[in-house]
Amino acid sequence: MRPALLNPLFAPATSLPGIGRGFARLIERLAGPLVLDLLWHLPSSLVDRRAAAAIADLEEGRIETIRLTIEAHKPAAGRRPYRIICGDKTGRLLLVYFTVKGNYLERLLPVGAERIVSGRVEFYEGLPQIVHPDLVLRPEEASRLQAIEPVYPLTAGLRPRPLQKAIAAAVERAPELPEWIDPALKEARGWPSWKEALRSVHAPRCESDLEPSAPARERLAYDEIFANQLAVALFRARRRRRPGRAIVGTGALSARVEEGLGFTLTAAQSQAITEIAADMASPHRMMRLVQGDVGSGKTVVALMAMLKAVEAGAQAVLMAPTEILARQHHATLSRHLDGAVEIGLLTGREKGKVREALLARLQSAALPILVGTHALIEPDVVFADLALCVIDEQHRFGVGQRLALAAKGENADTLVMSATPIPRSLMMTVLGDLDCSRLWEKPAGRLPVLTRALPLERQSEVVAAIARPLEEGGKAYWICPVVEESESADVAAAEERFRSLAPLFPGRVGLVHGRMKAAQKDRAMAAFAEGATRLLVATTVIEVGVDVPEASIMVIEHAERFGLCQLHQLRGRIGRGRDKSTCLLMYEAPLGAMAKRRIEILRESEDGFLIAEEDLRLRGAGEILGTRQSGLPQLKLADLLRHEGLFAIAHDDARLVLERDGALESPRGAALRLLLTLFRRDEAIRYLRAG
Ligand code: ADP
Ligand code: MG
């Protein structure tokens, strides 16, 4: 039930004076159906209608407001529009009308009278003119002149004045609401109350009032972010109330495996492993995200987590989005485990007897770790005692798939891993209910990748440049372009490139693309990993997770067709070993402005988070997450980039509030319930009640 206090805001826009059905439909298309939606429709600019000094001071292209004397009317003649000559002490100005009804203009602007006129000034044949003024007032009406008017984004058919009036009426309707923001924060930021903020954003006095950093705008943005983070924190709290199981490993296996790794864990990896172990050991259900840039070493972290489950006598599973990746994980983990623990592989290719045998061992608890693709989700895959699900490259899976896997265990813990470096603000908004471990550093000793851009015409130079390192035992990827229309076109491009490169390096060139049979793909990947082939022509099937540390060169054809994060992921395949690596971005000239900027960013940075922020700036949030990621909230008042700093504050405050007042029963708690309702987060309130 909605508190009565908010009823005026949740009333339809038609409840405001002067809003009929037709007008309401336009408003609905623009902002939404309710009074509240009008409040959230913020001005994008302003018009200054404070009277200008004189005609002589008018500036071309500006909206000006001037006091004029009407001198003469020149009715339309032939193709000439209706013109009215006006003047002041400093000069002459024309008012121009292309459509005129009856004697309307004679009544509005009688000769000899004074009028205040407002509109955009243009110069025509040396004379200033205003075509169809926005406003004509008698001098005694000057007080009606709102010196500075907000200008709202419009939709076709909607005129600015009525919209302005409707929004002003909505602001008047808005009640004073009890404060939900922490008083110290509000004070420190200089934020106004909610009602005051509304008044203020709809009555900007200067350009800086329109900035996202203006106190009133910032406050409303914070409200929205806070409502979001509070809802997220409530989901998390509810999840944590659900029963889990305490998985405490002996540490014996993991110590042994860690010793045999051949490298020392980074501080970030150790910390992530500690955080995961603590989550698993506690009786609540773990839902943790390991976020780390490509090459930050997430696989080992997953391995250590899985060993905890095995040490406790239970089972663990790792799901990867592609067959290549599942096989690679299986190979890598087998190598690290070195026989200490048995590990199975299940993809679409394991069939018949092999599959049956595997499933039998899984069900009888004889197989402690299983790696695979979404084939793991099949109903006949049954575990004896699954305690941990790890999902690699989680953004490649739908939420349903994630849940289906987790459902195979009783209260199983879940670990999701992602290399898509999502900007922090976006991550908190979309995945904020997950606990997060961040791999903030990459293993030591990695050399930076040199990234260069070359036009496609210089392909022969590129071929010459890679010949030498290939002869000396190096390895290179050659990535073929994404073709918009179809996957088969991708494949054709890759096959053609393979045919043209194969004779240049006889017996040394491999090919892998999405249309190949799984077994063929494996053979191609294995040949490349072992060094039988040294140049791998590939489509973006290798984008996700492939790890061949000796590969030190990557050529990307038509780099301009790839997205920024995608290029970053691709490039992340190299620079993993001891050799200095080079990435050659080949582009089709001339480059568009966006493509140019993308390539520039890649040349300047290897920091996935920075690149992701730039990507967000260039493309917007929806694009980054792709269609797979459901639940991207529509932020109306907040901006993921420009209000980025507010997300962390809201995140912390939301958790703090719930720690102190988990049921939101204090006076501030009651205000927070209003906030949740205001931003249509009622479902979160229901979770609260369910206790
Ligand atoms: P990603 O985070 O992209 O999944 P991987 O887990 O594939 O990264 O690891 C990338 C490479 O770095 C692998 O070859 C892995 O063996 C290696 N690696 C992982 N951790 C370390 C470390 N602490 N020191 C050195 N190399 C490491
Ligand atoms: Mg990986």
Image (tube, grey):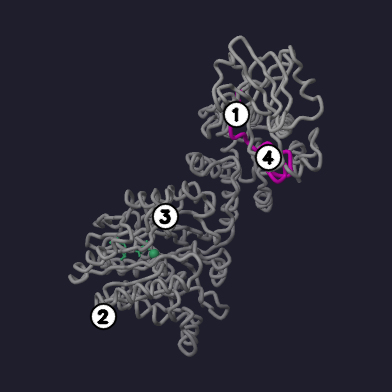
Residue picked out by circle 2: 507
State left or right for residue 340 relative to residue 670. Answer: left
Which circle, 3 or 2, is nearer the viewer? 2
34 in the magenta segment: yes
State how far apart marks 1 and 4 are (Cα). Answer: 31 Å
State left or right for residue 289 relative to residue 84. Answer: left
Q: Amino acid at mark 1?
A: Leu
State how far apart marks 2 and 1 are (Cα). Answer: 68 Å
**Label 3: how many residues lie within 10 Å, few (<14), some (14-19) or many (20+)?**
many
x, y percent for residue 159: 71, 36
Q: Quadrant of residue 113?
A: top right
Which circle, 2 or 4, is nearer the viewer? 2
351 vs 369, nearest the viewer: 351
Q: What mark, if any, has residue 674 been given in the picture? A: 4
x, y percent for residue 230: 59, 45
Count all numbered tags in the image, as a single digit.
Answer: 4
Q: Is residue 194 above or below residue 452?
A: above
The answer to which of marks 3 and 2 sits earlier in the sequence is 2
State how far apart marks 4 and 3 are (Cα). Answer: 40 Å
Q: What mark, if any, has residue 46 been given in the picture? A: 1
Q: Quadrant of ligand 1?
A: bottom left
State how far apart marks 1 and 3 are (Cα). Answer: 35 Å
**Label 1: how many residues lie within 10 Å, few (<14), some (14-19) or many (20+)?**
some
Q: Ligand 1: does it lie within 8 Å of the C-beta at label 3?
A: no
